[in-house]
Amino acid sequence: MSTTFTPPPSFSIPTSRLHISYLEPNNPTHSAFVHHLWNTDDFIQAEGPTGLDTPEKAAKFIATRVQSDYNRNKHGQMLVSLKPYPDASLAESKMIGMVSLMKGEPPNAYTQPDVGYTILPEESGKGYATEAGIGLIEYARRELGVEGVFGFCRVDAARSRRVLEKIGLEFRGERNLRVFGGARSAVYALPGMGGDLTVYGIDD
Ligand SMILES: CC(C)(COP(=O)(O)OP(=O)(O)OC[C@H]1O[C@@H](n2cnc3c(N)ncnc32)[C@H](O)[C@@H]1OP(=O)(O)O)[C@@H](O)C(=O)NCCC(=O)NCCS
């Protein structure tokens, strides 16, 4: 049985303008924010509806799916908060989005994670998704033993693809990925990673 991963609430991965932190089960501010972020028109247009259409469903999602990723991998869906001034603490900062490193779920888990991100529409276009992605990947490589990172997104998601390029991932072609129900995806990977995705438990 896996143990429950409970980082201190003050833990954060700081970048120059942001804090990246864990979502807390039983924190109503966090569940209200996830509910709001994942129901903006911008998000639904890009990702489709998640089914998290009430704060209560978002709270259950954090307590189950998000927490089980943390327990398995020590990473998963994370909060992105904007510092009001350079040395501001996490508590002083305002939630503006989410960034993730996910390895799927057993039995469809893969061995190296893919990076994802969402930024509130009113805060987009300022480089925050790129900064959060770079910050989380650097931390995961340095502290969590993550060696490779993928980026998967819809082929027509130009804005998201630009973020993956700015994060430093290389385009590796288009695939129908089983992990996304066979959907056609643009595949990106960190330089140095092999082109054969089956090595990483991802088949097409
Ligand atoms: C996609 C998203 C995360 C981008 O966040 P962001 O903080 O605005 O991203 P950044 O500012 O770091 O970078 C955006 C880049 O895309 C570019 N861009 C914006 N619209 C674009 C478009 N239609 N076509 C191509 N590039 C575009 C921007 O110019 C910028 O690149 P630049 O710095 O070279 O000018 C945000 O818009 C979002 O959350 N969208 C909804 C959810 C989503 O799509 N998530 C990704 C799922 S894979």
Image: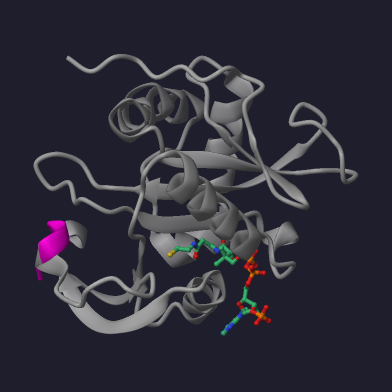
Say left or right for 179 vs 27: left
- What residue range appears in magenta? 199-204
Task: Locate the C terminus by quadrant.
Answer: bottom left
In terms of secondary structure, what is the magenta stretch mainly?
A: loop
Measuring from the top left, give residue 45's x and y in whole percent. 47, 66
Residue 81 falls inside the magenta stretch: no
Say left or right for 22 vs 62: right
Residue for point 46% across, 24% down? 59
Residue for point 36% across, 49% down? 146
Ligand 1 visible in quadrant:
bottom right
**Most foreground residue, 130 or 180:** 130
Measuring from the top left, give residue 48's x and y in whole percent. 39, 59
**Most foreground residue, 134 or 25:** 134
Say left or right for 178 vs 45: left
Residue for point 59% across, 53% down? 135
- 47 above or below 100? below
Q: Quadrant of residue 156?
A: bottom left
Measuring from the top left, give residue 164's x and y in whole percent. 48, 72
